[in-house]
Amino acid sequence: MRIGLLIFGDINTQSGGYLYDRQLVAYLRAQGDTVEILSLPQSSYIDNLRCGIIPAELVESELDILIQDELVYPRMFNINSKLKVRLSCPIVSLVHLLDSSRPQGLGRRYVARWAEHRYLRSVDGLILNSRHTRQLVCELLQGNIPPHVIAVPAADHQAPLSAETCGVEIGGGKAAEGRTDSKNPKLNILYVGNVIHQKGLHVLLEALGHMQRGHFRLTVAGRLDMEPAYVKRIYTTIRRKNLERMVRFAGSLNSNSLISCYQEHDVMVLPSVNEAYGIVYIEAQQFGLPIIGTFAGGAREIIQPGINGYLIEPGDSNALAGFLTLLHNNRAHLKMLGANALRYYRQHPRWDNSCALIRAFLLHSIAARSPLP
């Protein structure tokens, strides 16, 4: 197959969505397919909505099928009808997270719903990363959803480690094993995600404010440059709650450093208000870490409360503090959750499994579009 992948910006950008894109490209190329990455320059949201010109990157392309990362919807929602004629091939959208489902002002959300509705109507098929994403798309399109495939993200992109290396067989991470018998061990909490409002770091800090000092340490692994005003609010919260000595900002970590980070912690917390699936949830379980997420989004497809982690309502810092206190006080329970987390990871699809589903869907889409002999 000759496949085009249309994205905004650099495919090496550190985020779950771009990681998914990279894994798919690598798999397709390993199958002998030709994949051309077509990158559109970043522009303002309004400028993208107003632009009705087919991107130059696509004008000369000769493709069997074009995949569009759904992030490009404000640029393409009004162009795809013309693009189909020019390219004479199916267009499939890879949907990680609907923009209109993110927390934002009513006006911005209304525009996003209108444009995303038109965009999703303009494509021939959808690649969806979770049942939750399918539900959101189905609601936006009033049930009239195009042909689609659900291919969940995986976590085997991390370097393979033996159970002995990372201490995951006992559950609760290596840190839990090493400090279980020590006097008043600290609970080592890990947050993996860019420091932006929708990821919910402020909720975690509020929860820590309810807990006894000396019972925990928090490491924040993620970018700090995406929402400066929100980051300033985070630092203010830390000072106000006297958490300076308990919170460490590790910044954006490469793969090896992130692996070490998972090894050194007991539990991973990401109280996001809208996580379509959450690759980091699966990553954490690979290292025997229980996970705490929210009922909002795809975390419900990964986390079984009381078995491999816990779920809270978005913004419920009291409930989060209660679960963290439970894990601090009951290390046997922490180990049990961690062992179950590892078991869940081992049963989870690998990238090759999910990408094979996508490739089969692409071939079917091409066959369905081709004229009969």
Image (spheres, rainbow, N blue to C red):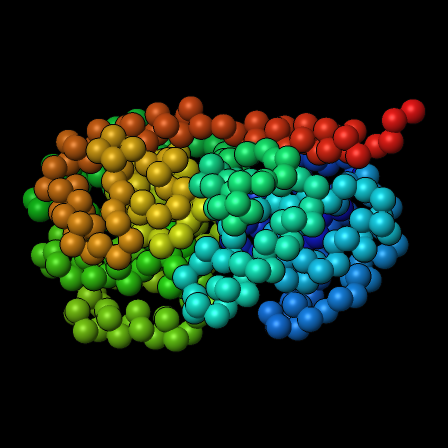
Q: Is residue 284 above or below residue 214?
A: above
Q: Is residue 254 left or right of residue 204?
A: right
Image coordinates of residue 124 in percent, x first then y, are 70, 41
Q: Residue at image x 57%, y 31%?
A: 354
Q: Residue at x 92, y 24 (%)?
A: 373
The number of discs equals 0
Q: Which of the 4 image quarters holds residue 357? A: top right
The quarter of the rendered structure image containing the N terminus is top right
Tell me: residue 240, above or below residue 344. Answer: below
Q: Residue 302 or 263: which is nearer the viewer?
A: 302
| Whether residue 307 is situated above or below residue 52 in the rendered picture | above
From the viewer's perspective, tell me whether residue 360 is left or right of residue 159.
right
Residue in the image at 40% along x and 30% along y: 345
Image-quadrant location for residue 71 = bottom right
- Left or right of 26: which side holds 335? left
Q: Is residue 300 left or right of residue 128?
A: left
Query: Can residue 158 be seen here?
Result: no
Q: Nearer the viewer, residue 36 or 339?
A: 36
Residue found 63% across the figure and 62% down from its top:
74
Q: Where residue 231 sits: x, y (%)? A: 37, 70
Answer whether residue 370 is visible to the viewer in this image.
yes
